[in-house]
């Protein structure tokens, strides 16, 4: 059964008002979702291939629904229109979200629009503790990030990194451990935790919209700023690929500091959290290199990075990017940039 046929069946079972809308498959551009346009409705079906957070199918849908509902209050994320629960037709279910009409982000020209979008999301009031579920809300977001990096770093050996790269990465991990040992922490806000430029579309009015919301959490906003401008992010997506200069990164940060409510609380954290976000990204690359070779899992629950779940062209692109980021030159490039920004 084709994905379109499965979606049609699920829409009919849910008695959706869009059950008979023409379905148009979008190009396969992501490792976690397939997308189909419900033509003429302004709605996209977002169909999980897996859960990047290793959740059960129903929990994954509930988590993503909360991501869209909360981030869309900023005016820079799509609205949620509905949820199709897991079913025999769609074992992982689907979300129905607003289709954003726009073009892919272009760098460096759209950096300020991305900074404005992130500032709007980060300026949203922090909900009371009892209202933050189901999104992650760790008591210590920095320690949580360190633990996630450590869990992914177990794949470094099998990923085949050279000794010099491992020493360089270990030095940054030591710096992160020292940062975690300090008592002070900046405040939390809602963050995307997947703010690479390829996840933004630019509306005709110039407003940037973050269209991929799966891993949002209550954490530290500089992590999003790093993810939007690191080499491992700005060269990830073909349509938005560019290598930024330190001056362009600093201009982006300055724009965000100007636009985000309460931003001074995070100014001194911009550089150390940039290093931490890179550690998360490069350790994820090692994890993907190892796990992509495995066969796809059965059923609708959990995490699954198998290359079998995506088209060959997408897998080849991801492998090319991962090889670059894990190479000695790729690792050194980022560390040199961190030093330039520190200077």
Image (cartoon, grey):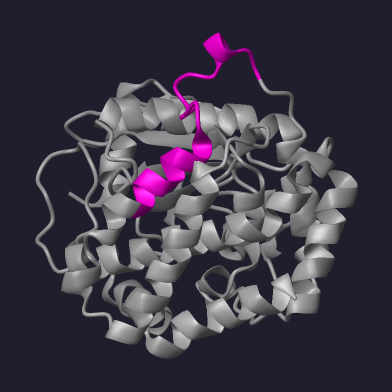
Asked which quadrant contains residue 252, the reply is: bottom right
Q: Nearer the viewer, residue 56 or 273?
A: 273
Where residue 36 sits in the image (x, y, percent)? 43, 50
In the image, what residue occupies the spot 68% across and 51% down?
Answer: 269
| Above or below for 203 versus 218 | below
Is residue 198 toward the left or the right of residue 23 in the image?
A: right
Residue 313 part of the magenta segment: no
Residue 68: give x, y in percent of width and height. Answer: 56, 33
Res. 326 visible in picture: no
User: Residue 198 occupies which quadrant of the picture?
Assistant: bottom right
Residue projecting furthest to the top: 130
The answer to which image quadrant residue 230 occupies is bottom right
Q: Is residue 149 left or right of residue 38?
A: left
Q: Residue at x 74, y 57 (%)?
A: 114
Residue 129 in magenta?
yes
Residue range corresponding to the magenta coloring: 127-149
Q: Would you place residue 335 above or below residue 152 in this image?
A: below
Tell me what residue is drawn at x 65 percent, y 77 percent.
Answer: 339
Q: Residue furthest bottom?
A: 329
- Count every numbered label the image shows and give the total: 0
Whether residue 100 is visible here, answered yes or no, is yes
Seen in the picture, residue 183 relative to 200 is either above or below; the reply is: above
Who's the residue at 13% across and 39% down the image? 299
Residue sitting nearer the eye, 283 or 83? 283
In this rendering, would 254 be left or right of 295? right
Q: Observer-nearest residue: 27 or 254?
A: 254
Dividing the image into 4 quarters, which one contains the C terminus? bottom right
């Amino acid at each position: 059964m084709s994905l379109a046929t499965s979606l049609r069946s699920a829409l009919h079972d849910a008695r959706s008002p869009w059950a008979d809308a023409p379905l148009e498959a979008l190009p396969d551009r992501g490792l976690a979702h397939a997308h189909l346009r419900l033509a003429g409705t302004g709605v996209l079906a977002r169909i999980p291939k897996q859960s990047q957070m290793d959740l059960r199918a129903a929990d994954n849908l509930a988590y993503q629904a909360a991501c869209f509902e909360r981030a869309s209050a900023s005016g820079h994320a799509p609205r949620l229109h509905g949820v199709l629960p897991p079913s025999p037709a769609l074992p992982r279910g689907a979300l129905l979200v607003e289709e954003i009409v726009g073009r892919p982000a272009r760098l460096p020209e759209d950096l300020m629009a991305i900074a404005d979008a992130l500032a709007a999301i980060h300026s949203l009031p922090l909900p009371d503790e009892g209202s933050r579920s189901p999104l992650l809300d760790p008591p210590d977001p920095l320690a949580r990030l360190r633990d996630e990096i450590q869990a992914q770093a177990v794949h470094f050996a099998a990923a085949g990194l050279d000794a010099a790269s491992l020493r360089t990465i270990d030095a940054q991990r030591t710096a992160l451990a020292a940062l975690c040992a300090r008592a002070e922490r900046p405040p939390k806000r809602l963050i995307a935790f997947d703010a690479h430029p390829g996840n933004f579309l630019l509306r005709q009015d110039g407003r940037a919209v973050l269209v991929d919301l799966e891993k949002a959490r209550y954490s530290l906003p500089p992590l999003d700023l790093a993810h939007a401008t690191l080499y491992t992010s700005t060269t990830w997506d073909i349509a938005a690929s560019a290598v930024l200069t330190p001056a362009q990164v600093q201009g982006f940060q300055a724009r965000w500091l100007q636009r985000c409510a309460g931003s001074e609380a995070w100014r001194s954290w911009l550089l150390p959290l940039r290093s931490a976000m890179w550690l998360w990204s490069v350790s994820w690359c090692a994890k993907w290199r190892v796990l992509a070779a495995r066969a796809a899992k059965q059923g609708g629950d959990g995490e699954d990075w198998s290359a079998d779940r995506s088209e060959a062209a997408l897998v080849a692109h991801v492998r090319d990017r991962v090889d670059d980021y894990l190479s000695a030159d790729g690792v050194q490039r980022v560390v040199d940039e961190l030093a330039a920004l520190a200077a």
